């Protein structure tokens, strides 16, 4: 299994989102991260086209977009967590 890496940006975005998230939202978030870790080519992912030389993907989770990519070494890097606040 690939190593999971979290950028500072992702961790900061998560820290901003988590206090307002319900326990159900957090559980869904955790299960989605686990699903991405198990299969980074998860059906329903969307190419981000952020950097054509290092492809990355978006995975929608309700009000969240999880931005991730596979590193050159095969590790899974979580780059950003975008949240759409009501």
Image (cartoon, rainbow, N blue to C red):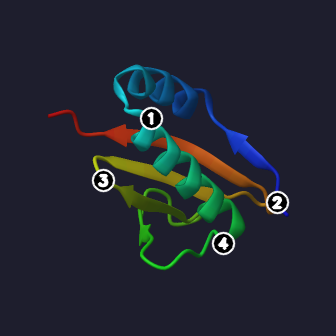
Q: Which mark's residue is nearer the viewer, 3 or 4?
A: 3
Give SS at disc 2. loop
Q: Which mark is residue 62?
A: 3
Q: Earlier in the sequence, mark 3 or mark 4?
A: 4
Q: Which mark's residue is nearer the viewer, 2 or 1?
A: 1
- Residue 77 percent across, percent down from the top left: 66, 49
Q: CA distance from mark 2 to mark 4?
A: 10 Å
Badge 1: how crowded within 10 Å, few (<14), some, or many (20+)?
few
Give SS at disc 3. loop
Give SS at disc 1. helix
Q: Which mark's residue is nearer the viewer, 1 or 3?
A: 1
Q: Count how many numbered circles sit on residues in the image.
A: 4
Q: Earlier in the sequence, mark 1 or mark 3?
A: 1
- Residue 67 percent across, percent down from the top left: 48, 51
Q: Which mark is residue 79?
A: none
Q: Mark 3 near mark 4, Cβ–Cβ under 8 Å?
A: no
């Amino acid at each position: 299994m690939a190593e999971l890496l979290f950028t500072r940006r992702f961790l900061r975005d998560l820290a901003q989102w988590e206090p307002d998230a319900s326990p159900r939202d957090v559980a869904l978030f955790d299960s989605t991260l686990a699903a991405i870790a198990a299969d980074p080519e998860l059906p329903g992912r969307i190419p981000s086209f952020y950097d054509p030389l290092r492809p990355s993907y978006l995975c929608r989770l309700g009000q969240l977009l999880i931005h991730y990519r596979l590193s050159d070494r095969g590790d899974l890097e979580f780059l950003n967590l975008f949240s759409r606040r009501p």
